[in-house]
Image: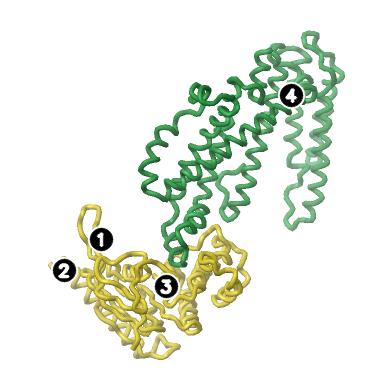
Amino acid sequence: MVSSIRFDNVKKTFTTIDGEKVNALSGVNLEIEQGKFICLIGPSGCGKSTMLRILAGLDTPSEGAVYLNDKKVTKPGSDRGLVFQDPNLFPWLTIYDNIAFGLKARGMFKKRRGDVSDFMELVGLKGFERSFPHQLSGGMCQRASLARALIGNPQALLLDEPLGALDAFTRMNMQDELLRIKKEQNMTMIMVTHDVDEAVYLADQIVVMTPRPAKIEKVLDVKLSQPRDRNNPEFIRLRSEILKILDFAGKEATPEYNI
Amino acid sequence: MKYLRPLLPLLSLAAAEIVALAVPDSPLHQPANHPYFAVLLVVVTALYYIFALLSNHFAKRRKTPREHPLFYRAPFLAGVILFGNLLNIFTIKTAIFPVLYFPSLDRVFGTLVEDRELITKCIGFSLGILLKGVLGGLLVGFFTGLAIGFSKTAEYWINPLIRILGPIPSTAWIPILLIVFTEARNASAFIIGISVWFPTVVLTSSGIANVKNSYFEVSSTLGAGTFYKIFRIGVPAAMPHIFLGLFNGICGSFVALMTAEMIGAKYGIGWYVNFQKEMMAYANVYAGLIVIAVMFYLIITLLFKVRNRVLGWQKGVIKW
């Protein structure tokens, strides 16, 4: 098994303003296989976003390291696309220019000009080339930000609660879009989410995390075939298993309620 | 009443023309060479109707026609003509206002025509200084602001300097600048530069500081280098602030220009007003003020046209 991404005993400590040290991540080991869909799930403060930011190169670990194809991650790069909960489209650029941004930044726009319309089509935004972000709905902006991250042909797409701000209908729609894009582009996708249902629906592997100390509690393989039925007994069993782990962890972490 | 509205300017014009041409002038006033005021009113009214009819013609072709332009601005123009008419009555017709300080409108507008050579020369001179000063102040301010916004070291060393030097009114530098610069016009340009520089620095650097950090993070993950991030993320994201700084700076530069030209200048529209005041030629003073108003109005309008083009993606904050 060739693992494409490896977390090797990654620790991250922040120092608060009061000088207190907070463990944002205490010793994470994880191997992720190329082409898998991974969901990181857990309550706030479990370090799932920190893991993603370290992998993206936006934060550096206090100890340990992350490897992408056996190369240590030290800074952000176009081999890892990143999508936030907020689409973060550049408001001064049109949708077309937003999507083309990565190509232009790396001086590849002249050669790959045609790709921009291909990726606009991939995310279903054809015809909105000349619109500005403020003219589009939240779901459409998130599609544009997806295309912007995908156009650099990253090996891994990192998604930090990308669907969190969308309404339920758009959200389910986008989940199917993500699966379709992953299949077409054959890339690794790592997604942080709060939504257990979403995790079971999308992931090949679910990484359940707990806070205090922030670490991986369990890694679950989802053996269901795509497309998944949300009412399948195995689907429901997995969901309740994850909820159980999370609930259990929650009680462990808050002993003050057990007076 | 509805049909009377577009005709209001004509009524007001008729009243003003009767007063201007039929009522005898007061002997206290110095007579003008031509009836400039009466002619000007006719020209303005004629232009108004031509433009109103033209834009009305084009508005009909638009999908959502605006209010009939003949109706919209007509009362305003009628009011303006009425105001002119009253001024005319109080000055040349009755000499109720002090004759020395309130010359007849004919002489004020006459100055614009008869003294046009000197006025044009002064406008050119002022615009030259303004352009030099604004461009210099803008460029230096913009790059200082960028440095402060992006570099902690630059912020550490330059920021205290700006806090101390910035609030000094630019005209307070005049005594020193007169020694440093041998030519008065360079001193004037420098004063204007200072008054543009300060707001530009402050708003550029604070604009950069207010750019959402996630924009920089996203652009790093898309493979953008440092220079690309500064000029393709930082600058456009801070552009609304930068324009605000430039707007404040240019408004300040008008004050600076007028003051600067009142010391040791040989030409310039500020010099013109000051010089004519000393000659007790108040008709020329008013003419100079009219020129200043029109000139600065056009400059600010131009600035906002540029802003609307550059910041088309943003919804307008200041309306002009």
Q: What residue occupies the far top of the structure in this picture?
A: B28
Q: Counting residues from the N terminus, which is met first, the one under dot 2 or under dot 3?
A: 3
Q: CA distance from mark 2 to mark 3?
A: 39 Å
Which chain gets the green colouring? B
What is the chain letter for disc 3?
A
Between tags 2 and 1, which lies in front? 1
Q: From the image, state whether disc 1 or disc 3 is nearer to you.
A: 3
The residue lying at 46 percent from left, 44 percent from top is: B145
Answer yes or no: are tags 4 and 2 on the same subunit: no
Q: CA distance from mark 3 to mark 4?
A: 67 Å
What quarter of the picture does the C terminus of chain B occupy? top right
Task: Residue lying at the far front in this picture: please name it.
Answer: B182
Q: Which residue is mark 1?
A: A14
Of residues B45 and A37, the one nearer the viewer is A37
Mark 4 lies on residue: B118
Of circles 2 and 3, the one toward us is: 3
Badge 3 density bin: few <14, some 14–19, many ≥20, Cα 10 Å: many
Kindly indicate whether the residues beneath marks 2 and 1 are on one polypeptide chain: yes
Q: Which residue is mark 3?
A: A80
Read off the residue under disc 2: A255
Spatial separation of the CA atoms under disc 1 and disc 4: 70 Å
Name the residue rendered at 77%, 25% in the picture: B117
User: Measured along the vertical axis of the image, is residue B111 above or below residue A84?
Assistant: above
Q: Which chain is yellow?
A: A
Corner quadrant of residue B261: top right
- The CA distance from mark 4 to mark 2 is 88 Å
In what element is the residue under mark 2? helix
Callout in the foreground (1, 4): 4
* Residue A139 shows in this picture: no
**First along the sequence among labels 1 and 3:** 1
Amino acid type indicated by mark 3 = Arg
